[in-house]
């Protein structure tokens, strides 16, 4: 398909450009998950302690609003609860930054013109930007699943899949924002705003589910 | 004459600004064609349309026998482009960018690439962020010149190059022409166009104002003459096509419309010429006169409207 010509070369270019930035983001997110996990493991050693913690959380509207309901009282469950929604928002930001960086910002800086004069199909730049973002997103999800795996495989996979979903959704939001805005800063603003509003809607939903419910 | 590209009646508007207003441009295969105009005349817009990066509102454009918008991908294999303001990726080296641009065009000649790096004295190992404007320009130039494209589209490619590199650039363009490639060189540096171009198109406010060979265009200009004569000249100012006459004893300075040059010289030799300095019309003057006359008519219009 000629509209996609050059996608592979552009994907390689993107990976080469972000050879430092993507690993740093992934490491930061992973280390925050790992430190949360280690923290809970050290803090609440018994099931009873964790249950007490969970009851406290689920009874309080403010923590419900911020982190959502705590369903699983294993150490892995606590970690997934603590990092689930908040982590997904960060994954969203990560994906938004990547997509805008490789679409609107490239065009704004004039580099897209240099690239576009080559054998590059009209859909190749956006496609390669989304592919790159998904490569980073899936790599992050696999690693977070691996970090959580020994606390329960099913929960670990669910967390990873959740992050992939959040990343893919907000990458798509960013792709649309890049099309409708004239410069990268506005595009980032729109996409991050959508993340904020999504988080708020979830917070309202979780908080109004009521204590104990 | 086979044509490499033909543009006629091209119109492009951005909101209420009319960037191109029925622009015409024809470039023959194998020639170096100068595309001249002041900043904002529509040179880059025309080039973006030719590259299929933008769509014209109306008018037609044909490039190497194809449609610049519809056949963009296949045409780009045969075109190399250098923008006037090259931005590179800060953490990629110049060499990486040259290879990338080569790959995007379907390969480049490695020996030629290395030779060009040498001639332009460009260090390919430096990162994009460490290059000066001139060096970023060289990166795009090396990538374009090392390709085997049939058509080079250069949009003010020498902005930021020092005079020495400008010389190298001119040599390279001449070599490209000798290999039978076509070059569209947009510029507002007149000496560059005079040195390189076979034919020139001058545009202003999105319209073509003049197109032809340099010789043809020189007919529109004046040659300036300074002569030391045997006796004071008489009545020279009344000859047709003579302007700005200044006589000091036996010295005379004047400007003459190039077509009337012969008659004026004949008159001078009748008096007896002791010394003569004549300056050919420069493109600069051609340019200025175009703009002056346009500016004057604009001013008149404004007055009339008031």
Image (cartoon, rainbow, N blue to C red):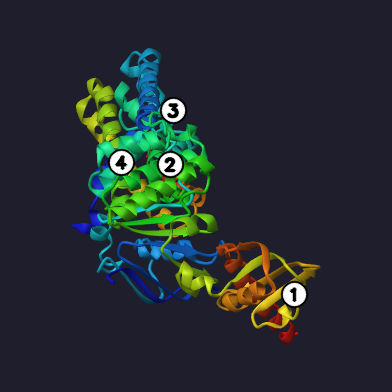
Check disc 4 and report its element: helix, strand or loop. Answer: helix
- Spot the residue most to the right: B249
Task: Measure how far apart labels 1 and 2 are at the Cα level.
Answer: 54 Å
Q: CA distance from mark 1 to mark 4?
A: 67 Å
Instruction: Give a yes or no on whether discs 4 and 2 share a subunit.
Output: yes
Q: Nearer the viewer, mark 4 or mark 3?
A: 4
In this figure, which residue is indicated by the disc labeled 2?
Answer: B138
Q: Quadrant of residue A86?
A: top left
Q: Which mark is residue A56?
A: 3
Q: Out of A189 and B185, give the one closest to the viewer.
A: B185
Residue in view at x 56 percent, y 75 percent: B220
Residue count near mark 2 (Cα–Cα under 10 Å), binned few <14, some 14–19, many ≥20: many
Q: Which of label 3 and label 1 is nearer to you?
A: 1
Q: A28 or B192, which lies in front?
A: B192
Query: Are both tags, 1 and 4, on one chain?
Result: yes
The secondary structure type at the circle numbered 3 is helix
Query: Where does residue A200 sit, x and y in percent of width and height?
Result: 47, 46
């Amino acid at each position: 398909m000629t509209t996609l010509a050059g996608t592979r070369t552009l994907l390689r270019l993107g990976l080469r450009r972000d050879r430092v930035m993507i690993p740093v983001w992934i490491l930061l997110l992973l280390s925050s998950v790992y430190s949360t996990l280690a923290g809970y493991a050290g803090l609440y050693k018994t099931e009873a302690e964790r249950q007490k913690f969970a009851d406290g959380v689920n009874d309080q509207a403010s923590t419900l609003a911020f982190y959502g309901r705590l369903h699983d009282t294993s150490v892995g469950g606590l970690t997934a609860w603590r990092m689930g929604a908040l982590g997904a928002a960060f994954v969203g930001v990560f994906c938004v930054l990547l997509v805008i960086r490789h679409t609107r910002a490239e065009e704004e800086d004039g580099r897209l013109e240099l690239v576009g004069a080559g054998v590059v199909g009209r859909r190749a730049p956006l496609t390669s930007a989304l592919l790159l973002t998904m490569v980073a997103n899936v790599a992050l999800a696999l690693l977070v699943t691996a970090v959580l795996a020994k606390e329960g495989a099913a929960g670990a996979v669910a967390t990873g899949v959740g992050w992939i979903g959040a990343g893919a959704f907000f990458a798509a939001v960013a792709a649309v924002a890049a099309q409708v805005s004239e410069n990268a800063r506005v595009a980032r603003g729109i996409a991050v705003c959508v993340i904020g509003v999504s988080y708020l809607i979830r917070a309202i939903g979780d908080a109004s589910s009521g204590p104990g419910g | 004459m086979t044509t490499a590209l033909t543009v006629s009646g091209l119109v492009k508007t951005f909101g209420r600004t009319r960037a191109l207003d029925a622009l015409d441009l024809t470039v023959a295969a194998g020639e170096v064609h100068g595309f001249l105009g002041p900043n904002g005349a529509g040179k880059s817009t025309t080039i973006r349309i030719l590259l299929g990066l933008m769509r014209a509102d109306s008018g037609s454009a044909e490039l190497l026998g194809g449609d610049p918008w519809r056949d963009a991908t296949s045409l780009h294999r045969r075109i190399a482009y250098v923008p006037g303001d090259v931005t590179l990726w800060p953490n990629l080296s110049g060499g990486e960018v040259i290879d990338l641009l080569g790959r995007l065009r379907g390969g480049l000649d490695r020996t030629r690439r290395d030779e060009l790096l040498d001639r332009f004295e460009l260090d390919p190992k430096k990162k994009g962020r460490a290059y000066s404007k001139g060096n970023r320009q060289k990166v795009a130039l090396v990538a374009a010149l090392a390709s085997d494209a049939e058509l080079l589209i250069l949009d003010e490619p020498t902005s930021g190059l020092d005079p020495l590199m400008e010389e190298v650039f001119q040599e390279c363009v001449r070599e490209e022409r000798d290999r039978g490639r076509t070059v569209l060189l947009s510029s507002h540096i007149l000496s560059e166009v005079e040195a390189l171009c076979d034919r020139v198109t001058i545009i202003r406010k999105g319209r073509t104002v003049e197109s032809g060979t340099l010789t043809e265009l020189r007919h529109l200009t004046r040659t300036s003459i300074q002569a030391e004569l045997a006796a004071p000249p008489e009545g020279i100012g009344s000859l047709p096509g003579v302007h700005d006459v200044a006589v000091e004893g036996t010295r005379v300075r004047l400007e003459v419309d190039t077509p009337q040059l012969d008659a004026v010289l004949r008159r001078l030799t009748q008096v007896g010429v002791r010394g003569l300095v004549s300056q050919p019309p420069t493109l600069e003057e051609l340019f200025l006169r175009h703009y002056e006359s346009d500016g004057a008519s604009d001013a008149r219009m404004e007055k009339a409207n008031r």
